[in-house]
Amino acid sequence: MQGTRGWLGFVNDIPLTWKFVLIYLLCVLMPILTINVLFYKQVSENIRVREENNLHMTIDQAARRTMEIIVGGVTLSHSIATDRGLYESLDREYPDLVAFYDMFNSGLNDKIKSFLTAYTYVENISVYTDNYTIANGGHFFILGERETSSVWYRTARDSVSAVNIVVYQDDNPITRDGEKEYFSIIRRLNEYSLYNKHTKYLKIDLKISRIEDILNQEAPYFRMEMVDDKGNVQFPLAARRSLAEPNVGEAAGRGNNMVLESTLGAASYIQGWKIIGIAGESQFQTALNDATRFIWMLAAISTLVPTTLIFVMLRSYNYRIKRLARHMDKAKNEKFDLIRLREGKDEIGGLIRSFNRMTETIEALINDVYKLEIQQKDMQLEQVRAELKLLQSQMNPHFLFNTLNALLVVSAKNGYTEVTDIIKDLSLLLRRMLSWSEDAVTLQEELHFTEMYLKIEKFRFADRFDYSIEIDEASARCMVPKMCIQPLVENACKHGLQSVKGQRFIRIEAHQSGAYLYVRVQDNGKGMTTDRLAFIRSQMNSGLDADENVGLRNVYRRLRLHYGNSVDLKIESAPQQGTTISFRIPVKP
């Protein structure tokens, strides 16, 4: 009965190979690749976020360290700007240079030197004044035309802030034939109104190399630049010099590079200044490449290993199922071939073993039925041929029977009593042989007619012949094929006793033991040689058309037709020692 179709019916219509391919693609390969792609994207994003956080930490640390230097310089400027003795010394007018040097050597110069020793990131401290009674030298200078035209002076003069930071170029005090970059903290010294007779300026030059070291700590992977409040790049000097018109856009506008920034502080002198970090793709590419290699290696392993295992398992499953399907198709065409392979211990192996057992059983049943039909036909044919052979072995039994009746009447009229009894027995034997309607008789009946034949033989040989019949009560009721003992007795009389001189004797024994009936016919005739005995045994299964040993073969073949392989017939003989023929047949109720 065909069930309702639906999506399950559609799935059932898909060939097994395509089912395995779909299972692999949809349930194994695509999930693995999807998970690895998503994992790759997540890891890439995590790496970018991690590297960005690291860069933020780096730029914040650089800004903090830079601000520490600037704040230290500003603090130093406060310390100097609040030194009353300095104001007093610089506001005083000296009568000559000797007086100034006395003041200079008495402690003024040592104050500045102590600050330089304490602040290692300070390159120089310079104090400028319009007091022309002092001499240029050390850390004190007179404001001249060159100074008043300089950038730092104009910045300090025009600024409303007490402290200013300026980056500029000025003469190199060592070579005097070139310019030098300066990063200076400029401050007007006007803390005390009592000492405002002369204008005074403080210039603290910070070491640019310290700033450069801070900014170049992550170069070349992460380039940092310091820009002022106008967006001009101030440090590193190389970046500042490479830009004709430095600005943030030019400093940071470098393709798709990541730009980070960190302000230096909120104080007026540094407000708007910031550290800008420029990170190229190479900053992330190395870490990303490492992660990419790991992810793809993981993807390859997670794909290859399940693919290999699934291929092996599905190939085993698919191969055996196809073999089973092919052999089942053969079975529809009545070709029952066994599936010869290692079945395995799983369910498919169980199906294959069951199919092989079923095939063997069907093959055996077919063979048995076929052979049984042939055997039955052979039995029917053999039975007919046996009956025909038996009838043909008679010399016109109807004519002989009528003749015997005529002899019986004559013998009775003339008083031939012995001849009359013999003719009666012979007539009964012939009548029994002619009535073959029932093939099975009791053993007692079979022996009764056999005894009739023995009486005829005793009449023939007179006192030189005798016989005995021994049968138990249980075996007397056993059913046996008709004419299964008389032909054996006839053979014994004809071939065994006829040429014997002296007393002739035949013994017939029958008894039942268990499920079998044992019958034995023994004579004291001339016996047979070993070769003759072997020849007779070989003739037992020959056709009924053979001329020799017809009676013995007839008995054996009919027993085989009735009882099959359960018949056991033996012939034992030796020269001058007689012959014994015995057979064993199953007892039929």
Image (tube, helix red, strand yellow):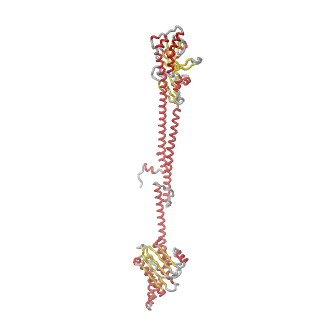
Whether 262 is drawn above or below 1: the answer is above
Split into 4 quadrants, where in the image is the N terminus? bottom left
Q: Position of residue 472 (x, y in %)?
A: 41, 78
Q: Position of residue 520 (x, y in %)?
A: 46, 78
Q: Image point 51% across, 33% down: which residue? A: 284
Point out the residue furthest to the bottom here. 414
Q: How many marks?
A: 0
Split into 4 quadrants, where in the image is the C terminus? bottom left
Q: Position of residue 16 (x, y in %)?
A: 48, 51
Can you see residue 392?
no
Q: In which image quadrant can residue 171 be found?
A: top right
Q: Considering depth in this image, is 270 or 374 the residue closer to the camera?
A: 270
Q: Considering depth in this image, is 469 or 353 the residue closer to the camera?
A: 469
Q: Considering depth in this image, is 269 or 31 the residue closer to the camera?
A: 269
Q: Considering depth in this image, is 231 or 359 the residue closer to the camera?
A: 231
Point out the residue furthest to the top here. 95
Q: Position of residue 556 (x, y in %)?
A: 49, 75
Q: In which image quadrant can residue 518 be found?
A: bottom left
Can you see residue 1?
yes
Whether 329 is drawn above or below 550: the answer is above
